[in-house]
Image (cartoon, grey):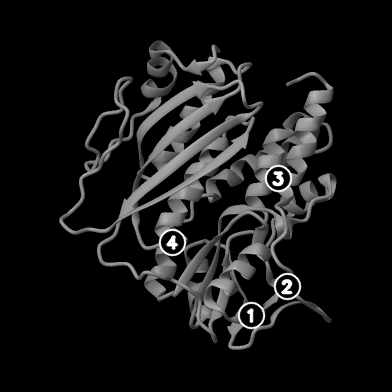
Amino acid sequence: MKIGNVSGTVLKRSILKQLHTVRDESMFEPTSEEMCAGIRVKESAPVIFSGTSVYGSAKSIGIFAMARAVNDIAARGADPIGVDVQIQLPPYAYESRLKAMVEWMEQAAERQNLQILCAKAEVSPAICEAIVHVNAVGTAEEEIPQKMVAEAGQDIVLAGWIGLEGMLRVAGRKEEELAKRFVPAFLNRIKGMEQELFALEQIWTAREHGASAIYQIGPGGILATLWEAAEAADVGLEADMKKMSIQQETVEICEYFRLNPYQMTSVGSLLIFTQNGEALVQKLQEAGKQAAVIGHTTNRKERVLSGGSERRFLDRPQPDELARIYESFIEQDRKEGKV
């Protein structure tokens, strides 16, 4: 496609025609001339925003950005309403790829009762892979505390699977290569895991249970998120790595590419800090969700990881494994003349 904003024809044909989910709170219809998104809120209702960006070549990458932003505002106490989407594409991208990306995002939005409030796209000569920017918005029924942090003496509950997002994005990026090594059934199971990226049910259950803080596992993986949560609350912690749930597919993909799943981003997976963590785990498991108590916070400064007979201190956050491997993917593409 040509460099610059996509034409009005492309915008209508490949973006706006794919958007069908409508919420009553939406003020403006997404059109080619509309530059803004607006929502109606109840008098004095708090409005919460969160934004994120995701890069990649798979047509499903927009779902990862949507899920992260939507889960983040839900974890902060809001009920998500919709998202604003901005897509940047490299010059060699075809319109069919843009249309497929929007279709995937709209399908995810419909499943989660979200509206894509505004969607735009442009072609940029400064990038070699697509970038999707998403801003999510939601409202809360009551005032939200200025800070939501862990407290000493709480259980740490992991809801979801470590390394899931990173594994899915690597698998999407290297689908052809993986098809030569793994059977189709294995790869089909991986594709089905994208349904687990939205964690609204788990978040609402944790909020009702009285969790003081909910953190989505972000860049740097579960180890970085544990550190950041402890830093924010000025508490210590002890966590058992053997209790951290991981899908077998993640293990095999990480072994193949020599990645550390404990240092991989995992949108849709949560660290929940709460009293009586086992009761919360039971509620989540009864709803068919993966959850386990993996440790507890302390009033000491030490942040300790255990794994069987081994004990070590938690290190400061390290760069995400996904970012590291993507650098090598892009460098390989350059050598092969693909970008």
Hey, what amino acid is under mark 4?
Answer: Ala
Is 139 placed left or right of 338 in the picture?
left
Q: Quadrant of the N terminus?
A: top right
Mark nearer the N terminus (2 vs 4): 4
In the image, residue 117 above or below residue 78 = above
Q: Which residue is mark 4?
A: 75
Task: Give coordinates of residue 72: x percent, y percent.
Answer: 46, 56
Q: Are marks 1 and 2 in contact (CB under 8 Å)?
A: yes
In the image, residue 36 above or below residue 268 = above
Cα gap from disc 4 to disc 1, whole angstroms:
21 Å
Q: Which residue is mark 2?
A: 314
Q: Are marks 2 and 4 in contact (CB under 8 Å)?
A: no
> In this orientation, which residue lies closer to the viewer: 100 or 285?
100
Occupied quadrant, residue 304: bottom right
Q: Which residue is mark 3?
A: 323
Hey, what amino acid is under mark 3?
Answer: Ala
Q: Which residue is mark 1?
A: 237
Cα gap from disc 4 to disc 3, whole angstroms:
25 Å
Q: Secondary structure at mark 2?
A: loop
